[in-house]
Amino acid sequence: MLLTVMGMNPNTTADFSDLGLLKEVSEVDVRRFRSSISDYSRAIDLALDNRDDFKSTQYSIQAAQSGVSAARSGYFPRVSSYMSWGWNNNQLTEFDQGRSFLGLSFSLPVFDQFQTNTRIQNATLQLRQAEIQQFQLEQSIRSSVQAAYLNLESVEKQLDITARSLKASERNFESAKERFKVGSATITDYMTANSQLITSQINRINTVYTYFLTQKELLFALGKL
């Protein structure tokens, strides 16, 4: 599945190393990441400033506005000028006998079969479409930023819960192991404590990786990734 996502042949033999992946996260790491991102009150403005897709909609609106202005120019008078120089002789001499021509023309649109009006309406429609697309994208960014912050808060709480649960399971397992050694606990007690410890370890690992994934999702929503 991963190879397919990466655009590679899914039948290719691949070996992935997790040496570069962090397997634990501390409270210091959580606070450090929190300090590296903006407060939620500023997050929306930061995302709108950083997101390239939102900037693209701004450029689209500017282009559409220019299109409306260009279409409206069809109602304006047009003034044009021209200049030329001509020379006619059967020999390559007397170049100073050439003639210069200078002209100026003025045209005033009276009736163009509503072509200008049609162009203005089409350009205005394109501008409106660009504005709607920007509004929809802005709402999507606001929603994704809000969801990312809520997910981060939820995972941070899960980190604390799984850390406490893991410590409790470790202590319970050590206690069951010692009691089993002296005969005051059965094999069932020992296996139950061991199973609870393994479950706590799995929950902790899943939560840690979910936290790192949530970090990346938030950074992407803020336009920092």
Image: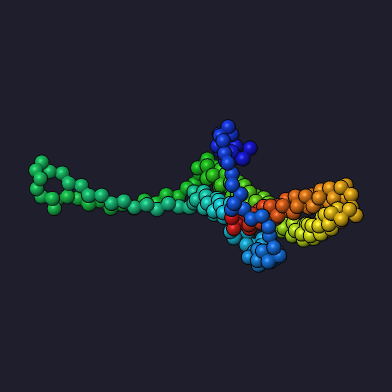
Residue 106 relative to residue 214: left or right: left
Residue 183 relative to residue 206: left or right: right
How many labels sit on residues?
Answer: 0
Residue 128 seen in the current view: no
Residue that appears at 89% across and 53% down = 183
Foreground of the two, 69 or 4: 4
Work out which quarter of the rendered image holds the N terminus and state it: top right
Residue 191 seen in the current view: yes
Residue that appears at 87% across and 47% down = 187
Residue occupying the far front of the picture: 182
x, y percent for residue 190 = 85, 50
Foreground of the two, 225 or 163: 163
Residue that appears at 13% across and 53% down = 96
Rendered view: 100 above or below 11: below
x, y percent for residue 191 = 84, 48
Rendered view: 144 above or below 30: above
Work out which quarter of the rendered image holds the C terminus and state it: bottom right
Residue occupying the far top of the picture: 11
Foreground of the two, 107 or 11: 11
Rendered image coloring scheme: rainbow
- Dividing the picture into quadrants, the one containing residue 179 is bottom right
Residue 64 relative to residue 143: left or right: left
x, y percent for residue 52 = 56, 54
Residue 92 relative to residue 186: left or right: left
